[in-house]
């Protein structure tokens, strides 16, 4: 795989993982009644913002783990 393709895969997987995790955190916060768009910075708004941030970070982490596992499989069997 060329360097450009590796970088494209890295960027797209990071973006997908982050956005997917952030959306999951947003939906979980909404289900708990924590609206990030409430007026002011009340406790529920801050909890919703924290859910989105933690979800985005977790999604990014999972995307990077997926990439590392994929690279390890490729090193073990270079035929694929």
Image: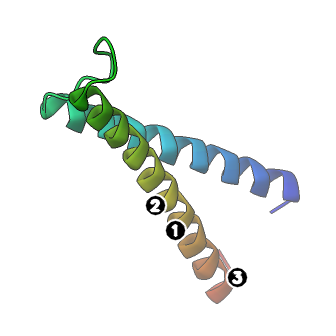
From the image, tell me which residue sits under label 1: 65
Crowding around mark 1 (Cα neighbors within 10 Å: few <14, some 14 to 19, many 20+) is few
From the image, tell me which residue sits under label 2: 62
Dot 2: what SS? helix
* Extreme-left residue of the structure: 32
Crowding around mark 2 (Cα neighbors within 10 Å: few <14, some 14 to 19, many 20+) is some
Would you say the residues marked 2 and 1 are in contact, meaning their CB atoms lie under 8 Å apart?
A: yes
* In the foreground, 2 or 42: 42
Crowding around mark 3 (Cα neighbors within 10 Å: few <14, some 14 to 19, many 20+) is few
From the image, tell me which residue sits under label 3: 78
Image quadrant for the N terminus?
Answer: bottom right
Dot 1: what SS? helix
* Extreme-top residue of the structure: 39
Where is residue 45 shown, x and y percent of the image? 28, 26
Dot 3: what SS? loop
Q: At 68% from the left edge and 54% from the top edge, which residue is drawn?
A: 10
User: In the rendered view, does 56 fall on the left or right side of 35?
Assistant: right
């Amino acid at each position: 795989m060329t360097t450009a393709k590796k970088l494209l895969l890295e960027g797209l997987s990071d973006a997908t993982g982050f956005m997917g995790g952030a959306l999951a955190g947003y939906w979980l916060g909404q289900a708990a009644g924590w609206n990030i768009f409430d007026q002011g910075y009340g406790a529920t708004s801050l909890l919703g913002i924290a859910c989105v941030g933690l979800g985005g970070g977790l999604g990014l982490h999972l995307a990077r783990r997926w990439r590392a596992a994929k690279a390890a499989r490729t090193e073990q069997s270079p035929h694929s």
